Every structure is written in structure tokens, then in C-alpha cells.
Amino acid sequence: MSIFGFLKPDRPAPPQELDIPLFPLKSVLFPGGTLALKVFEQRYLDMSADCLKREEPFGVCLILKGEEVGEPATVHSVGTLAHVTQWDMEQLGILQLGVRGGRRFRILESRTEAGGLQRARVQLLDEPAPVSVPAAQAGLLSVLKQIAADIGAERMPEPHAWEDAAWVGYRLTEVMPVQLLAKQKLLELDDPVSRLEILYRYLEPRGLVK
């Protein structure tokens, strides 16, 4: 037998899995995006303290059924890792968090702990290789650059990856005045060009792109 008969073909690395706490919100966090959170329920105060201590993220998911406070809510299965970038507690018992979106994930299984905090075993979703904004959707860039100038670096922090179709699509989606469910569906899309095509079709009839 040839020596090549003993060689095993390369296998793709298994998808990365994490066990993380969840923070259900009526907001959608996108990779590279920012959110300001006011935390006052004990379960989320404890969660935040633990994440800060361990320097680990938690998961932000859009609520499918339920509310942000009270009984644990049912969430959409795809969410985004939230990395704490700043925190402050000017008033006792109320924690102000600034978070930045990391990798997208899909919930594989979830559970609710005694204090009402939800945790989940999640699979991190692969992001496609960077691709430039196609010429057919190039008009979206001028729209986004104007929005970025209007809202400032605090809401759209640098670096600005104008050449990256995924980054451009995420930034446009998070500022568009559309329903949260539409934003969730665009978050779940794996193809960044398809996301730009949808955004272009939404903006073109409104005369916002050329």
C-alpha cells in the first residue's frame, strides 16, 4: 500500500461552542455595533459582574415572546456576543453598560437558572471572507457615510470598514427605521451581498440611493 493510503484527508475544524449567559432585549446587536444598557435586575447585575470579572462576553438576543424584565423571555435563536467596553454605577443598584458586538451565534440548547438568568450552549457562526461592496450597491456607501457623520463616532465608532460589505450591511441595518424582526432576519443572513441587495431595494424606492 502506498504511504498516501495512510494519510487522512484534512477535516474542517468543528464549530466552536460556548456556554454563555443570555440578555434578552427588544434590540438587535450586530457584530461591530454598540449598545448602551441600563442594568438593574439582580440576575443581570450578577451576570454583568461575573462577565467583567472573567472578561467574558454574554449573549444578546432579540425577544420573541415576553418582556425584558420579569419572567424569562423566549428569544430568537440567533444572537450576538456582547463584550463590555465600559461600565459605570453612578446610582447604587443601577449599572450602566456599554457593549460592543462580537461574533454571531446560534442557540443549541438553553436553560433557566434559579435566579431567573438564562444560559445557553451556543455555536459560533462563521463570518464569510471579506468581500467588497459590489458596484450595483455602491450607492449605499454615500448614505452610510452621511449617517456616520450625523450620529458621530460614539454611535458608530472607528475603525470604519467602508470596503467591507459585511460591515457596511451591519451598520446600515442597525440604523434603518425598520421593524426589529426585519433587523433580526438581516442579522441571520450569512451572505453580506444579499444583505446589501435587500437594503438597496428598501432604500431605492424612497429616493435615498442612486
Image (tube, rainbow, N blue to C red):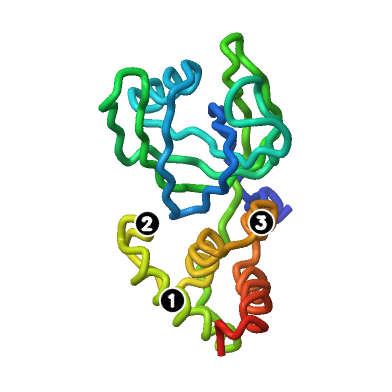
Distance in Å between CA atoms under marks 3 and 1:
27 Å
Q: Which of pointers 3 and 1 lies earlier in the amino acid sequence?
A: 1
Secondary element at tag 1: loop
The numbered mark at residue 163 is 1
Specify the amino acid type for callout 3: Gln
> Gap between marks 3 and 2, in whole Å?
20 Å
**Residue 162 vs residue 116: left or right?**
left
In this image, 56 relative to 65: left or right?
left
Vertical side of 11 occupied by 182: above or below = below
The residue identified by callout 3 is 179
Seen in the image, is 98 located left or right of residue 140? left
Sequence-wise, which precedes: disc 2 or disc 1? Answer: 2
Amino acid type at image mark 2: Arg
Question: From the image, which quarter does the C terminus lie in?
Answer: bottom right
Residue 39 % position (x, y) = 43, 28
Q: Position of residue 201 (x, y in %)?
A: 68, 78
Q: Which mark is residue 155?
A: 2
| Amino acid type of the residue that numbered disc 1 sits on in the rendered structure | Glu
